[in-house]
Image: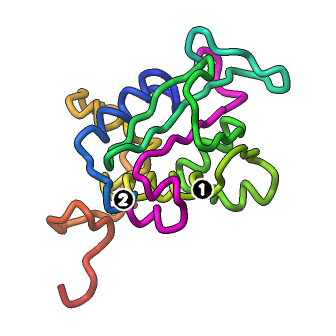
Amino acid sequence: MPPYLSPEWVQAFNDALAGLDLSDAVAAAGAASLTVAQGTFRVAQVVTGGPEGLAAPGAAASPDSDGATVRTVLTVEGGRLTLVEDPTGTIAANVTMVLTYDDALAIARGSLHPADALAAGRVRVRGELSVLVAGQAVLNAASAALGRTLTDLTDLTDLDAPIDLDAPIDLDAPIDLTESSEHSGPAPPGE
């Protein structure tokens, strides 16, 4: 699986979200922001301390961090999401956040709440904070619509991968006998 925010991951993100209309999520998020209410906005993310080889060619190294620095821009327009790499910082954004790779990954996985990271000083923000909040709400809606976290999107592009018959099997894991793919545990009593 490609590393989070690598060029391959960005492509998988865009491929997975290509047919997803999030107009309702954008409209709901727009209630708290005049910029978002217009239906088009951009959120830039500068991530420092990423794995070696993560940064796109032309990316500037961050003097205060070890590892790669990656700048991406999420554009929301017409209910659609598009993520692009912007190593030279030429794409204007309504808000820019700067954080470490580990914190970006934790936020994307849902193990670190963005407000907690912001309150702890682990995220620096320039621009319209309401746009950042709206961007997170739209990303959460995308994750819910896809039924997975956005960090796992590369799994969607590898559906034809061969099955590893030597992989260990967890015999204690619960077995889901329901037909719904949305249900991950045993059926509630009475069903």
Q: Which residues are magenta?
A: 27-53
- The residue that appears at 60% across and 50% down in the rendered structure is 107
| Horizontal relation, residue 62 to residue 32: left or right | right
Q: Position of residue 113 (x, y in %)?
A: 63, 59
Judging from the image, the colouring scheme is: rainbow
Q: Quadrant of the C terminus?
A: bottom left
| Horizontal relation, residue 8 to residue 94: left or right | left
Q: Earlier in the sequence, mark 1 or mark 2?
A: 1
Above or below — where is 133 with respect to 15? below
Residue at disc 1, secondary structure: loop
- Looking at the image, which is closer to me, 187 or 138? 138
Label drawn at residue 111 = 1
- Looking at the image, which is closer to me, 44 or 171? 44
Residue at disc 2, secondary structure: helix
- The residue that appears at 23% across and 34% down in the rendered structure is 159
| Horizontal relation, residue 187 to residue 53: left or right | left
- The residue that appears at 52% across and 33% down in the rendered structure is 73
Q: Is residue 41 magenta?
A: yes
Above or below — where is 97 with respect to 71? below
Q: Is residue 50 visible?
A: yes
